[in-house]
Amino acid sequence: MGDQGDSSRPRRDDALPSVELGEASNVLLLGSPMDERTLETGLSLAAGERPAGARVVWVTMLNSSREVLDIWDGHVRARPEQFRIVLVGDGLADAGVVTDAGVETEGLDDPTDLVTLGIRLLETVSTWADEDGEVRLRFDSLTPLLQYVEPRALAQFLHVLTNRLDLAGVTAHYHLDPMAHDSQTVHALASICDAQVTVDGDGVSVDHR
């Protein structure tokens, strides 16, 4: 479907870091949310090599749908063929409503309802299963979700979700601010994923499980 954004907006996708994941399909992205490289790395993971031909699910507790699109358009040269934005948390669903072609939004008011969130994500990717193009999921941060659910509950949720997404051929990444959580929580969530991408003072590194 190509780009539906403002053509005057600068496209900086050439500056997005290239992240070699190999066979990894579920990735924990560790980095400060205040570091622009963390955002750029996440967008690189979400866009892939052919963003215009991809189908992307973006889960957020941080931004309205309009803000999500502005972030994407400011960094990536083309919109995905299909773009579904899942807004988690009361209030986000009513902010920045969009009617752009190829973009769908839905809201989940209760961030503690991980069962419903998982069902909705899996239903979305299953409807795209028979269509061409990569399917990618971006969970723009697990950190705010951990204000509502216990680490053990989140780990159980991710364990089921990552297994199902792997079977569906979906590439997914989940951001976590490592400075906001103890090392035990970070390690537990990282152990569920195939790879860990770390953004720090040394640059961007990839460690496979």
Image (cartoon, rainbow, N blue to C red):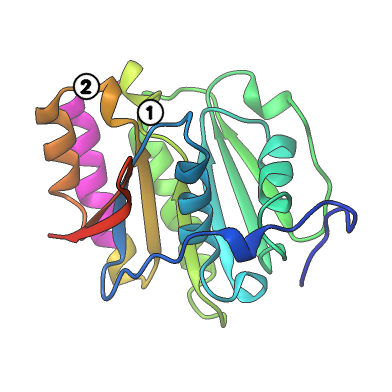
Q: Quadrant of the C terminus?
A: bottom left
Q: Quadrant of the N terminus?
A: bottom right
Between residue 65 and residue 195, name the one nearer to us.
195
Say what amino acid the circle numbered 2 marks: Glu
**Is residue 157 in view from this perspective?**
yes
Q: Residues within 10 Å of mark 2 (few under 14, many from 20)?
A: few
Q: Point out residue 190 in the picture as x, y percentages from the top left corner.
A: 18, 45
Segment colored magenta? 148-164
Between residue 197 and residue 102, name the one nearer to us.
197
Q: Is residue 189 above or below residue 91?
A: below
Q: Point out residue 3 in the picture as x, y percentages from the top left corner.
A: 79, 65
Q: Point out residue 164 in the picture as x, y percentages from the top left corner.
A: 29, 61
Between residue 115 and residue 137, name the one nearer to us.
137
How much space separates mark 2 and mark 1, taking CA atoms? 12 Å
Residue for badge 1: 113
Q: Secondary structure at mark 1?
A: loop
The reply to whether discs 2 and 1 touch (Cβ–Cβ < 8 Å) is: no
Residue for badge 2: 150
Say what amino acid the circle numbered 1 marks: Asp
Q: How many numbered marks does the figure carry? A: 2
| Left or right placement of residue 4 versus residue 20 in this view | right
